[in-house]
Amino acid sequence: MTVYQATASAPVNIACIKYWGKRDTKLILPTNSSLSVTLDQDHLRSTTTSRADPSFDKDRLWLNGVEEEIKDGGRLATCIKEMRALRKQLEEQDPSLPKIAAFPVHIASHNNFPTAAGLASSASGFAALVASLSALYQLPADASRLSLIARQGSGSACRSLFGGFVAWQMGERADGSDSYAVEVAPREHWPDIHALICVVNDEKKGTSSTSGMQRTVETSPLLQHRIKHVVPQRMAAISEAIRARDFDAFARITMADSNQFHAVALDTEPPIFYMNDVSRAIIALIVEYNRVAVANGGKLKAAYTYDAGPNAVIYAPKENIKEIVELIVKYFPQAEKFKDPFGLFGAAGVQPQVIPGFNEAVAKPYGVGAVKSLIHTRVGDGPRTLGAEDSLLGSDGLPK
Ligand code: DP6
């Protein structure tokens, strides 16, 4: 008997121009366009296996081995329904195709990074779901078409359907048909962009993106200014900076937009704080690091950005990452040895230090654990279709 099954993986993306606010909460249509860098799946990824089988009772999904309810009309159900509809169309056009759209599906998904680390797992998760169903259903749909569906799972997920540098065009239509992701440049255009993720210790449970951004839409006057007068210019300017591989411009826009996103969060009633003292200390370090570079007649060497939580993502050309790791570790000693996927450090490991001319008084040193871990990665490719050996479902159709 034929087994109808496929496995795919999808990357995490971290925005430089932030998506924050919906004009339609059901279809997940944003109030502004956004732009992100896709990170390398060799380091951070979601992997998903989907199987269609007439012997299954109903659609079921497991995340990291734990079954999740697929609520009627919810985000998961919507994505599965939309993917099935595309398969059905195909089967109607070509009656020789097996009629698998009618079968229930089992879906198993796994993140290779701890969900508790506060890294955006919904983006890679929904992108992997859509990519695996697309492979299962053998859809001819291109990445932008699939991004329309991933968007309805989680807005930022639409950008994880592409590698490299990706824009989510907000669109204008009420049905959302023009609100999808497009490639600004593939990773091969600017492979030198690396990222250092500083996983910041955070005890308290923050406000979710979904509820936080709606409160901002309802109460922040600053958001209206951002939507009308700031984001359109920044989208154009950062796209140009990427095309020209102009890191200085890329960094200025990225940091300004992170700052404004956190400003509109603060402008929300009641105010939302995503960054903490550690996040702000990392900003101070990057600002000082850049100040020294500019004082020496150079250009910006690093850019920070923060999502809806305290973790810092530092974008920088590869050649600067070693100095940045040494800087961060000087202020935030690590319990564990730095995982060094690009072999920047020899056997001696990281030597905590600042660059000459750096004003050490800009931040106070913290104890071990304030920054829990550091992840060095870089710009990466889009979703990958994997082989049967990577399947997350056993022959019984249940998670392995
Ligand atoms: C701060 O995509 O998680 O990371 O669409 O409600 O699922 P929903 O929100 P989500 O929001 C991401 C917000 C952000 C900025 C960004 O990724 O652009």
Image (cartoon, rainbow, N blue to C red):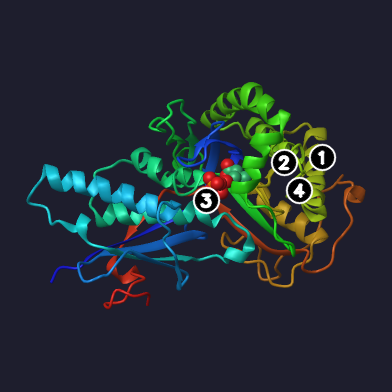
Report the amino acid beneath label 3: Leu
Report the amino acid beneath label 1: Val
The residue that disc 1 covers is 292
Q: Residue furthest front?
A: 72
- Residue 39: mark in rendering: 3
The residue that disc 4 covers is 273
- Residue 239: mark in rendering: none
x and y, in percent, of residue 130 in the image:
37, 52
Q: Residue at x 74, y 62 (%)?
A: 204
Q: Residue at x 92, y 50 (%)?
A: 361
Marks 1 and 4, how far apart at CA? 29 Å
Q: Quadrant of ligand 1?
A: top right
- Dividing the picture into quarters, in which one does residue 330 lie? bottom right
Report the amino acid beneath label 4: Phe
Marks 3 and 1, how far apart at CA? 28 Å
The residue that disc 2 covers is 265
Q: Which quadrant of the rendered structure holds the C terminus?
A: bottom left
